[in-house]
DNA sequence: ATTTATCTATTTGTGTGACAAATAGACTTT
DNA sequence: AAAGTCTATTTGTCACACAAATAGATAAAT
C-alpha cells in the first residue's frame, strides 16, 4: 500500500492568486506594461477581500513581476524584467546558498574556474579599451592602502569587469553565482599587505594577457590566481572550524 | 550646478521593512530556523500596523526567505534556502527574460554551447550508470509517438540529465538559464517526425560518446546538435517575424 | 499504563471598513 | 498660453474582528 499522500493543503488564497497571476504573466496571457484591474475589482473577480489581493500582488512585486502606482492613472502593471534587478536578486540568493553551505565551496570554485575561463576566452577576442581601463582602475585601487572590505570589493569589481568584457549578457548574468556570491567569504579572509601583493600580481598578469589578447597566458594567470584563492579559502575554513570548537 | 536629485521617495513601509529583514538574514543577524517575533510584536517594534508587517513578510515569503505556520508553536521562521526552489525561481525569471527578448537568443545559445561543453567535460569523467540510464530513458521516449510538447520536455530532460552528470551543483544550477529557459521557444518549433529524427540521432551519438567517456566525440555531437537547433531557432524567429507583419 | 479524544491558548489567515497620500486630468485663473 | 487649483481615482496604511490551524495540556477510555 503505497499511496503518495497528496499534500492537499489548502494553500493560502493569496498564494494561489499570486501563482495564477504569475503563470498568466509567464504564459504571455498578461503582457508587459499591461494594467491589471484595480485591487477592488480583482477582489470581486476572485471573490476575496482586498487585503488578500494585496498580499498576492506584494508577492509578485517582491519577484519584480509587477509594480504599482497610486493615482487615477495608477494601478498595478506588469513589469518588464530587468537584467540588473534579476542579477541583484540572484546575487542575494546565491550568497545565502554559499554562506549557508548549501553550495559546496569546492563546487563553486570548480564552476568558477571553468566559467571564468570561458569568459576570458570571449574577452580575449572582444575586450575594448574601456574594459581594460576599468580593470586597470581597479588594479590601481588595489595597491592603495584601503580597508580589507574595499580590497575585496575591488577584487570582485576586477573580475566583474573581466566577465563583462566577454560581452555575453547570459554569461555575465550567471557569473554572479561564482563571483559576487563569494564576496562575504572573501571578506572573512584578512588580507595582509604581503598577501595582497600576490593577488595584485596575478591580476596584473591577467590584465596584461587580456590586453595582449593572449589566451594561454591569461588562463595560466587565472589558474594561478584561483589556486591561490582556493588555498586561502581552505585555510579560512579550517580556522573557522577551529574557532567553532 | 549638478545636484543629483535623490529619489527621496518614501518607499512603502512594507518594502522598507522587508528590505531591512532581508539584509538581516543575508548578514546572518537572523539565523536559519530562527523564529521572528509574532506579527503583532513586529508591528509594535516597527511602529506600524499588522497588515503592513504582513505585506513585508509576504514579500520575503515570495523570495523563499521565510515560511509561516499557524498555531501556538507557529510563527514566521527563517527558511533554509533550497537549491530546487531557487532553481525553479531562476527558471521562471530566465524564461521571462528570454521570451521577452531581454536576453538575446544568440547570447543564450553561445553561452549554452560553452557551458554545456563544460558540463560534458566533467560528465565524461564522472557519469554514473544511473546518469546513462536516465538519458537512455529519455532517448527512448523521444522515439515514441508523443506530442510536440512532450518531445520538447523530454529534450530538456535529456540535457538536464547530461548536466546533472557533471556532478557540480553550481553548474547544474546555472544551466537552467540556458536549458529550461529555452523550453517555451522550443515549444514554438513544430517538430515533424523527420526533424525529430535528426535530434534523436544527435542525442544518441552524444549519449554513446558519454558512455564511452569520449570527450571529443561528445563535443562534436553537441556542436552538431546545437548548430541544428540554432538554425531551427532562427527560422522560427523569422517565421514569427513574418507573422507579426 | 498507554493510547485516544477533547479542550485551550496562541498565532497566522482572512474579511470589513475607513481614511491618508499620491496623482492624472479637468478646470480655473492670471 | 501658462500656471495654479480642484477633483476623482487608486494604492498605501490602519484598526478591529473573527476564522482556522495547531502544539500542548488535560481528560477519558481501553
Image (cartoon, coloured by chain):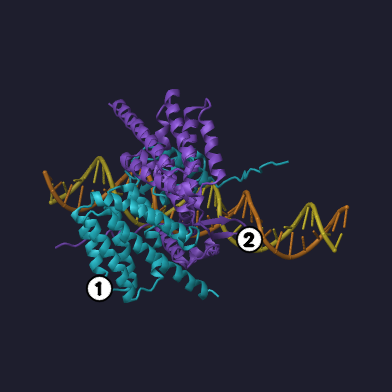
Chain colours: A cyan, B purple, C yellow, D orange
Nearer the observer, A9 or B180? B180
* Residue A122 falls left or right of residue A245: left
Q: Residue at x 24, y 56 (%)?
A: A210
| Residue A76 in view of the camera | no
Q: Badge 1 local density, few (<14 within 10 Å), some, or many (20+)?
A: few
The residue lying at 23 percent from left, 60 percent from top is A208
Q: How dense is the environment of label 2, judged by Cα within 10 Å: few (below 14), some, or many (20 and up)?
A: few
Secondary structure of the residue carrying tag 1 is: loop
Taking D1 as reference, is B144 above or below it?
above
Q: B111 or B11: nearer the eye?
A: B111
- Any mark on residue B10, and which? none
State the SS at label 2. loop
Q: Are marks 2 and 1 on the same chain?
A: no
Instruction: Give the residue number, with chain letter if any, for mark 2.
Output: B72
Q: Is residue D9 above or below residue B14?
A: above
* x and y, in percent, of residue C22 in the image: 31, 53
Q: Is residue B96 above or below residue A84?
A: above
The image position of residue B35, as x and y in percent, is 55, 64
Quadrant in which the C terminus of chain A appears:
bottom right
Q: The disc numbered 1 marks a residue on which chain?
A: A
Relative placement, left or right, of A10 versus B89 is right
Q: Is residue A190 left or right of residue A131?
A: right
Residue beneath label 1, please?
Answer: A144
**Residue B220 appears in which quarter of the rendering?**
top left
Amino acid at each position: 500500500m503505497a499511496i503518495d499522500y497528496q499534500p492537499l493543503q489548502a494553500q493560502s488564497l493569496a498564494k494561489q492568486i499570486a501563482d495564477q497571476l504569475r503563470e498568466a504573466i509567464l504564459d504571455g496571457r498578461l503582457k508587459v506594461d499591461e494594467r491589471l484591474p484595480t485591487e477592488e475589482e480583482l477582489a470581486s473577480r476572485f471573490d476575496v477581500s482586498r487585503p488578500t489581493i494585496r498580499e498576492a500582488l506584494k508577492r509578485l512585486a517582491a519577484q519584480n513581476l509587477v509594480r504599482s502606482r497610486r493615482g487615477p492613472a495608477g494601478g498595478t502593471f506588469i513589469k518588464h524584467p530587468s537584467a540588473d534587478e534579476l542579477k541583484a536578486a540572484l546575487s542575494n540568493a546565491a550568497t545565502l546558498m554559499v554562506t549557508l553551505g548549501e553550495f559546496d565551496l569546492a563546487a563553486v570554485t570548480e564552476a568558477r574556474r571553468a566559467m571564468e575561463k570561458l569568459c576570458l576566452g570571449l574577452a580575449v577576442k572582444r575586450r575594448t579599451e574601456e574594459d581594460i581601463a576599468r580593470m586597470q582602475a581597479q588594479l590601481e585601487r588595489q595597491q592603495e592602502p584601503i580597508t580589507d572590505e574595499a580590497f575585496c570589493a575591488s577584487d570582485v569589481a576586477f573580475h566583474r569587469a573581466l566577465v563583462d568584457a566577454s560581452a555575453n549578457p547570459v554569461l555575465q548574468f550567471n557569473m554572479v553565482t561564482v563571483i559576487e556570491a563569494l564576496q562575504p567569504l572573501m571578506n572573512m579572509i584578512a588580507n595582509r599587505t604581503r598577501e595582497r601583493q600576490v593577488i595584485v600580481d596575478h591580476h596584473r598578469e591577467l590584465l596584461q594577457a587580456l590586453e595582449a589578447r593572449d589566451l594561454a597566458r591569461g588562463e595560466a594567470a587565472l589558474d594561478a590566481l584561483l589556486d591561490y584563492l582556493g588555498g586561502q579559502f581552505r585555510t579560512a575554513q579550517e580556522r573557522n572550524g577551529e574557532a567553532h570548537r
